[in-house]
Image (cartoon, rainbow, N blue to C red):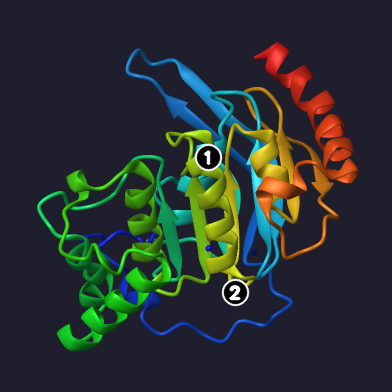
Amino acid sequence: MKQAPVQSGARISAQHAAQPAVQPSTPAIEFRNVSCRFIAPDGKATVALRDFSMSVAQGEFIAIVGPTGCGKSTTLSMITGLLKPTTGEVRVMGAPVNGIDPRIGFVFQADAVFPWRSVLDNVAAGPLFRGRSKDAAYDEANEWLRRVGLDKFGKHYPHQLSGGMRKRVALAQTFINKPEILLMDEPFSALDMQTRTLMQDELLQLWGGTGSVVFVTHDLEEAIALADRVFVLTARPATLKKVYEIDLPRPRITSEIRYEPRFIEISRDIWHDLREEVQIA
């Protein structure tokens, strides 16, 4: 698949209200020689990214892997506009990033739900915030709950759901807003292996190649099972070490594709590169 809402409650820049048509050949996301430096409270500078370049095509699913703390999540923050590069440029749909873009959805590692609202109210919140009528928003919310298998749980509250069910709520919250770009930051890392595998398959089914996805993960097998390409980052300060084309056929069933000889071969090759950086880190 090549897809948070920007969660309800976030302010959407007026400049994005009417988006110009984007040519299919225009990359969905571009990093052009980006560096990012943080200044700690003690005054010391930390470089998270250095001379980092990346291009993601429209409708493409890419995964980013690298050592812990190398700056993988920093890339997502810059795509959303929550963090600005120190040098270089980040572009979304051909235009420089400047504020929150309603075409971008974000699924976090932690559940981004309102605990005091029912499941149905949580899913309907995005369309309501974006100006949909109440009837239309709740009709759409019910449809998305059906699609993620939670149509019988609309009146439940998040604390009454399992981890996998809450993650399905997060996917419904996101996809209901029809994002053209989906950013995912370790979304399934807190789930047990069985539930995680089911959620990976559910993500691929919901995505279906309808938008661009940037998926950050520590799990190399997850990255290969989901993505069209895997970007390997170096140890901090991170730059792009290598890009791997994942030439596994779609549609994929992640629980089965892991046993394919080609999957094992790709995993071995990427781990050889990644292990060097993990040892450095």
Which of 215/135 is in front?
Answer: 135
Which of 105/156 is in front?
Answer: 156
Q: Is residue 229 left or right of residue 44?
A: right
Q: In this view, does 180 lie to the left or right of 279?
A: left
Is residue 204 positioned above or below 189 on the image? below
- Name the kind of residue labelled 1 in the image: Gln
> Which image quarter holds the C terminus?
top right
User: Any mark on residue 210, and which?
Assistant: 2
- Residue 189 in sight in this render: yes
- The earlier-in-sequence mark between 1 and 2 is 1
User: What residue sits 21% from the left and 61% below the top?
Assistant: 119
User: Any mark on residue 57, and which?
Assistant: none
- Name the kind of residue labelled 2 in the image: Thr
Is residue 14 positioned above or below 174 on the image? below
Q: In this view, does 38 lie to the left or right of 210?
A: left
Q: Can you tell which quarter of the image residue 124 is in? A: bottom left
Residue that numbered label 1 is attached to: 194
- Residue 131 in sight in this render: no
Q: How many marks?
A: 2
